[in-house]
Image (cartoon, rainbow, N blue to C red):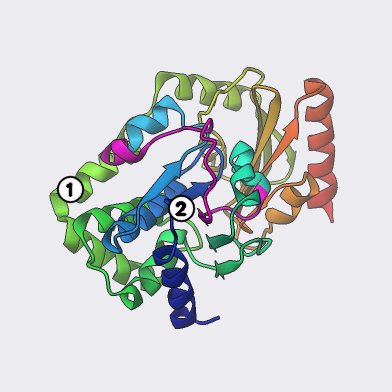
Amino acid sequence: MDSKAFVLEFRKAVVTSRSDVLILTHVQPDGDAVGSAIAIQLILDQLKVKSKIIWNKVSQEAWHKWDPFAEAIVCDLSDTAQYPVVITVDCSNPDRLGEAKRFLETAKKVINIDHHTDNSLYGTINWVHEASSVGELIDAWLPLLDVVFTSSLAEALIVSIVTDTGRFKYSNTSAHLFLVMNRLVALVGQTRYHELMSLLFAEESLLKWQLISLAIQNLTMVCEGIAFSYIDRDCGEEDGLVDPVLSIRGVRAAVLARPVGDQLRLSFRAKDTQLNIRNLAQHFGGGGHIHASGATLNLTDFPKQIEEIKSAMEAYFSE
């Protein structure tokens, strides 16, 4: 399906919907998830289509970071309505929706928009292509919808793109992306762009720095250039804890394990472009990108699980 065909299917599905269109993304939404979901809602607004976003487990820290979109940050998993049309963004498989997965069961059409190459193509309409972010995908086909490129829409796409490229540090950054950003920043203005970047990156919570401190204390090198660490306390919904480990000079890839409630969450990152960290994540039932992936396990015996993860890393990177 090319861009034109997708846009025709997209428009037909949403415009003919006789009830609100539901927009979903993965549990503990990141910047790409939030920005792209908001962008879809703004597009639907222009098409005169009513929509609703249901978020799943948005942390208080995230509420602060997503301040520009505060009115849309709503978490209401108790909703019992049925939605004939559901749009999912930045979600490679239904399980990543968490409790919100149940909304797919009663939907007549599921529009799946994603940039993860391991997407399971679970939608009735799938727009899945490799890109820096879902925001970049939306920007590419948006002109075909004949909607106005507003400053609010540009803000949402900026949040999506900037966060999922690690502020343009990751290998998914392309020359084309800077052309896109030049146009988006021109729409929002330099002052507003600076405000957005300050909200996203200038401050972190004290709790996050305390958790990072624990991660550094528990750091070990399972083999040359491969770092592993864990945090032995509940991290809540704090995210981005593996990045400081990866930033250490000489570290080519890093894995961080952290408990969140009754789950053990694993973050996989690589800055060596020759390393495929996604395959290791898939060993634990996870997935994502080649250089940035994640997995979630049931938390059972924490010390035992930590040793099993280290052993799996040693075996994987010794091959």
Q: Is residue 93 magenta?
A: yes
Q: Amino acid at mark 1?
A: Arg
- Alpha carbons under labels 1 and 2: distance apart: 19 Å
Give residue 115's position: percent from left, percent from top. 54, 63
Helix, strand or loop status at disc 2: helix
283 w.r.t. 77: above or below: below
Residue 121 pos. (x, y %) = 65, 64
Say which residue appears at 26% left-offset and 69% top-offset. 147
Residue at horizontal 55 percent and vertical 45 percent from the top = 26
Residue at 38% across, 50% down:
51
Q: Point out the image quarter for the C terminus.
A: bottom right
Count all numbered tags in the image, as a single digit: 2
Query: In front here: 42 or 275?
Result: 42
Q: Nearer the viewer, residue 195 or 261?
A: 261
- Residue 177: x percent and y percent? 37, 68
Identify the mark at residue 164; answer none if there is no mark.
2
Is residue 166 visible in the rendered structure shown here?
A: no
Q: Residue at x 56, y 39 (%)?
A: 27
Q: Quadrant of residue 222?
A: top right
Residues rendered magenta in the picture? 67-94
Structural crowding at the residue carrying mark 1, measured as other residues with C-alpha within 10 Å and reported as few (<14), some (14–19) or many (≥20) = some
Dot 1: element:
helix
Q: Residues within 10 Å of mark 2 (few under 14, many from 20)?
A: many
Q: Which mark is residue 192?
A: 1
From where the camera sits, is residue 106 visible? Answer: yes
Magenta span includes 118: no
The tag earlier along the polypeptide, 1 or 2, is 2
Looking at this view, name the residue that lies furthest to the front.
18
Amino acid residing under circle 2: Asp
Q: Quadrant of the N terminus?
A: bottom right
